[in-house]
């Protein structure tokens, strides 16, 4: 359904406060993490992943706004959208804050910082013990959160050894 542009509705959408991180899959199965704070600032690709319905940008924004405003927070099971819990979001935000506050440029630096300062108990939901070939039980975060954090920070995973396995603890 197409929504004709309405300036008042656009302002309401722009002023609507959100702080939600979701993971979505595109048709090829590639996962993306999207941090939604302002619906009007989402890219076309993000809007398309979050709201496949709607023929244009404004219509997609209206549908997404109505979904959140009406507290229909759970997407349809087949939508490919996975909303992170408040706990997951809080831990990811704290992890990102360490990265930013310390001007780190690589992901592994945060893991080392958390390990050195004995802070892993503050991350019970996202932490894991990771295996990288000959290096095992390395404190880190689970792959789905690693992917989300790299996307949110605009960094790559680096040139380290690939992850062979992980286990939650």
Image (spheres, grey):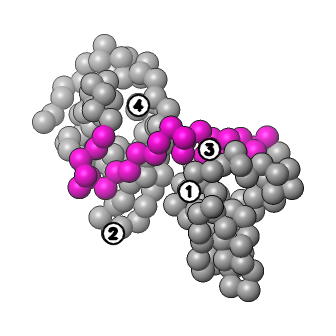
Q: Give me the C-alpha separation between circle 2 and circle 4.
A: 26 Å
* 56 or 37, nearer to the observer: 37
Are the residues tagged 4 and 1 within 8 Å (C-beta)?
no
**Nearer the observer, disc 3 or disc 4?**
3
Q: Residues within 10 Å of mark 2 (few under 14, many from 20)?
A: few
Sooner in the amino-acid sequence: mark 1 or mark 2:
2
Magenta part mainly helix, strand or loop? helix
In the drawing, does residue 122 fall left or right of residue 22?
right
Sooner in the amino-acid sequence: mark 3 or mark 2:
2
Q: Give me the C-alpha separation between circle 1 and circle 3.
A: 10 Å
Check the image and name the residue furthest to the top. Answer: 8
The dot on residue 145 is: 1
Q: Give me the C-alpha separation between circle 1 and circle 2.
A: 20 Å
Q: Residues within 10 Å of mark 3 (few under 14, many from 20)?
A: some
- The magenta segment is 74-101
Mark 1, secondary structure of its residue: helix
Are the residues tagged 1 and 3 within 8 Å (C-beta)?
yes
Mark 2, secondary structure of its residue: loop
Q: Is residue 68 above or below residue 125?
A: above
Check the picture and name the quadrant holding the N terminus.
top left
Q: Residues within 10 Å of mark 1 (few under 14, many from 20)?
A: many
**Nearer the observer, disc 2 or disc 4?**
2
The dot on residue 28 is: 2
Q: Give me the C-alpha separation between circle 3 and circle 4.
A: 26 Å
Which residue bears the numbered disc 4?
Answer: 40
Q: Position of residue 43 (x, y in %)?
A: 42, 43
Which residue bears the numbered disc 3?
Answer: 91
């Amino acid at each position: 359904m197409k929504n004709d542009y309405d300036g008042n509705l656009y302002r309401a959408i722009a002023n609507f406060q959100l702080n939600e991180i979701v993971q979505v899959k595109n048709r090829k199965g590639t996962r993306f993490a999207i941090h939604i704070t302002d619906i009007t600032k989402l890219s076309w690709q993000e809007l398309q992943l979050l709201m496949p319905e709607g023929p244009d940008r404004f219509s997609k924004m209206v549908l997404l706004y109505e979904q959140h405003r009406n507290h229909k927070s759970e997407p349809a099971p087949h939508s490919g959208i996975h909303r992170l819990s408040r706990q997951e979001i809080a831990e990811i935000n704290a992890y990102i804050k360490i990265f930013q506050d310390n001007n780190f440029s690589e992901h592994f630096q945060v893991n080392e910082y958390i390990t050195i300062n004995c802070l892993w108990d503050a991350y019970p939901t996202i932490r894991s013990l990771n295996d990288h070939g000959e290096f095992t039980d390395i404190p880190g975060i689970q792959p789905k959160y690693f992917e989300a954090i790299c996307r949110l920070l605009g960094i790559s995973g680096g040139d380290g050894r690939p992850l062979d396995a992980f286990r939650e603890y």
